[in-house]
Image (tube, rainbow, N blue to C red):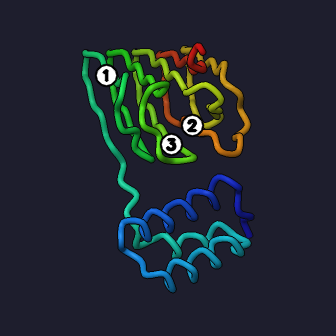
Amino acid sequence: MNGVSGPDRERAVELVQQAYADGRLDPAELERRLELALTATSSGELEPIVADLPDEVVHLTSTGGSVTRSGDWDVPRRLRVDSAYGSVRLDLSRAYVPYARIDIELRLAYGGATIIVPAGASANVDGVRSEWGRVSCKAPGRPRPGRPHVHVTGALPYGRLLIRAARG
């Protein structure tokens, strides 16, 4: 039996709360699903609670150009970036980040990526695989209550990844 990780439980609770805020769930269903999410003892118990709720992935693709997001932009809950040769720069420091956890999947063959997280935010890069590239995370690794947590996964065979906190 797989236990439930804190981020997985938080993600399920966020999806249920967002569905209620969007008018997809009535108060009774919100209460029922939150109770199930908060008392789940395995990740398998969380899946049916959120299976019918939207959790869209925003997909950005580039072959040789750059992918840049900065300034005032809406950060999705899940973002996937594919780039063969280009660079990626995601600056979340002035962006609208409505979620406690943001999942970013990077698929960069030769390019590099820089992710700037808001001051006080944390990031985890344990799910990033690099062969000849380099992965560097200068942001705190543990999630902090009330602050965004960026979870980065993916493959950068020859690319590099730098995650740093915004300069305050």
Q: Position of residue 20 (x, y in %)?
A: 44, 71
Q: Nearer the viewer, residue 2 or 27?
A: 27
Give the answer, above or below, for where 141 lies relative to 26. above
Cα–Cα span, label 2 and label 3: 6 Å
Mark seen at residue 67:
1
- Secondary structure under tag 3 reads strand
Residue 60, quarter of picture = top left
Residue 126 in percent (x, y) is at 65, 34
Determine contact: label 3, label 1, CB under 8 Å.
no
Q: Look at 64% across and 78% down and name the residue there.
A: 35
Mark 3, other Cα within 10 Å: few <14 / some 14–19 / many ≥20: some
Residue at (32, 16) in percent of width and height = 86
Check the image and report above or below for 60 versus 161. below
Looking at the image, tell me whether mark 1 or mark 2 is earlier in sequence order.
1
> Do labels 2 and 3 touch, CB within 8 Å?
no
- Of residues 23 and 39, the one nearer the viewer is 23
The amino acid type found where label 2 is placed reads Val
Badge 2 or badge 3: first in the primary sequence: 3
Identified by mark 3, the residue type is Asp
Between the C-alphas of marks 1 and 2, the distance is 18 Å
In the image, what residue type sits under mark 1? Val
Q: Which residue is mark 3?
A: 103
**Helix, strand or loop under label 2:** strand
Q: Secondary structure at mark 1?
A: strand
- Which corner quadrant holds the N terminus? bottom right
**Image quadrant occupied by the C terminus:** top right
Q: In x, y percent, where is residue 119? A: 61, 25
Q: Is residue 28 left or right of residue 141?
A: left
Residue assigned mark 2: 150
Query: Callout 2: few (<14), some (14-19), or many (20+) C-alpha neighbours within 10 Å?
Result: many
Q: Is residue 61 above or below residue 64?
A: below
